[in-house]
Image: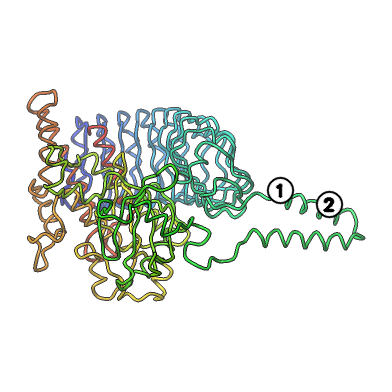
Amino acid sequence: MFLSQNQISGTIPDDMGKFVELQDLRVNNNRFLGMIPSSIGRLRNLQFLDLSGNDFSSRIPSTIGNLSLLLYMYLSYNNLGSFIPSSIGNCQKLLELNLSRNGLTGSLPKEVVSIPSLRSMDLSQNQLNSTLPAEIGSLKNLEYFNVSRNGLVGSVPNSVGGCVKLEFLDLQGNSLRGNIPSSLSALRGLRVLDLSRNRFDGLVPEYLAEFTLLALNLSFNDLEGALPQGGVFNNASAVSVAGNPKLCGGVPELRLPKCNLKHHKKSNLKLKIVMISTTLALAVIVGGALVFFCLKRRRPPPPSNPFANTLLQVSYQTLSQATGGFSEESLLGAGSYGAVYRGALGEDEKLVAVKVLNLSQRGAVRSFVAECEALRNIRHRNLVKVVTACSGFDLQGNDFKALVYEFMPNGSLDDWLHPDPDEEDQRRGRARRLGLAQRVSIAIDVACAVDYLHQQCAEPIIHCDIKPSNVLLDDDLVGHVGDFGLARFLTKATTHQQSSSLIRGTIGYTAPEYGFGGEPTTCGDVYSFGILLLEMFSGRRPTDEMFRDGFGIHSFVGNCLVEEAKEVVDPWLLREMEDAVRFSIGDGDQSFMEQHKLRQLVFEVLNVGVACSVDSAKERMTISDAVGRLQSIRDCVANGR
């Protein structure tokens, strides 16, 4: 039974249990409410159950444990408070379990973490407040485990080393404590490890440097000592250790203090002297002075300009030479506050993008300072990396300011969504278009970048100008959010230290509340991201001439989704789906179903865009939820479901 992505409301009748031969029940992303009927336990042939994205409340019925043939259980994005029933442990064939974002409380039943077949378990963003059961080690087939943003306590059990197939482990946002267990060294297949925002202490294990990690987040704990060398620790864009003031060492980009072994030795010597004899008062005083001096040196004074001690500053002459004298041939584009040039910097002639500020433009200097301030302490794989900066004078003695970024060879997302028909590669017949999987992946890249700015920075940052032209694509078409010229720190924005009149988002992408003098908020960025999503999958700009008199892209897409009208989908994507089905192997009915599934996935993405771009800021989907939804859609695209 497939009823996904509709506007169906009301309750599921209790006589649902009469359909005893039912094998597949998907009613996700509707408006069902009330209780999940206990009669669902009579569907003993059920293999796929998806009730996610509704308003089910009360509790998960214990009879759900009667579904002994169940392979997939998705109950996320509901209001299923209360406890996780231990009877789920009876579903011994379960491959994937997703109970995330429900407000579930209590403990994680040991029966649930003893299902040997489980490959994926997502219990994130609930209110679980127990310890992690030692039985977790029995999950020999587990590849994905996410219990982030709960209230879990205690230490990580050593038995977790038994999850030998684990590739993704996310424990962030709990109250876990103690050392990072040595048993994790058995998880040689780990690709992503997030232990951030807990209370872990002690040393960072050396074995982590031996893993082939794609991302490691240890930020905001109480870790100490020297950071290991090699492996992921040599890639500052893949590792985060912010908020651990006792850590030292590491690559320069991590900006940790140098390890001062001499200081620690003197501190220990001082302690020994005090314990041995009180007659050496002078030595104690001298030792105390040395300790104070060392600590003082480890805490540098605040920088005198926005990028001091963070960016290697270059001269005007260096940038002029790198860009051929800022020639027209090297010009990549121009914006409100300046122009961007392609250049080759350094002895290795590394390709860079040089943004030269037009200082005669009102607000350009403020934009430069805002961008430097925002980029000074942030680092994420989906943010454009700033390489260096220049603040000085040109050859005529005029003020000159520029920022240098890593070069993105595939240009902006806007270039790909709306290619210029006169481009040379178009004349050669090479259409610059993005397929469904690529668009979903880029959308996730942007959402992850925004989520990082809002949720994971020490001081949350509001971008204020999320749009396709500010999303740049690298060699692998990975999306990187750039242009922080309008960025605001949340603490400053909410304390009115910056006037809202200075907020100049881009028409079509700016949240409606900004038009009425509202202060910048994270909800404003979510609105802009929602509009970007609608543009990516409908193929229409929000400023299209068809949108006028209060009828915008949000209304257009929302109305079309109700009728599942294919006119809402970018024609290029429709052609891609038709081509994929045309060349697939199978009978006509299978081909039709495959095309229908692909279109449904596009509709799901558009639904996320609509939910993010509603007029009321309070009713918008959170960026974290948007990331979760899009990642689920990406998995479906990849798996052909």
Q: Which quadrant holds residue 349?
A: top left
Q: Quadrant of the N terminus?
A: top left
- Single out the residue that lies furthest toward the front: 396
Quickly name the residue at label 1: 261
Judge left or right: residue 391 versus residue 155: left
Q: Is residue 413 visible?
A: yes
* Mark carried by residue 272: 2
Residue 484 rendering spot, x and y as whole percentages: 35, 60
Q: Earlier in the sequence, mark 2 or mark 1?
A: 1
Label 1 residue SS: helix
Residue drawn 85% across the image and 57% down it? 274
Judge left or right: residue 241 versus residue 549: right
Q: Which quadrant holds residue 437?
A: top left
Q: Quadrant of the C terminus?
A: top left
Judge left or right: residue 493 versus residue 558: right
Tell me the colour scheme of the image. rainbow
Label 2 residue SS: helix
Residue drawn 54% across the image and 55% down it? 243
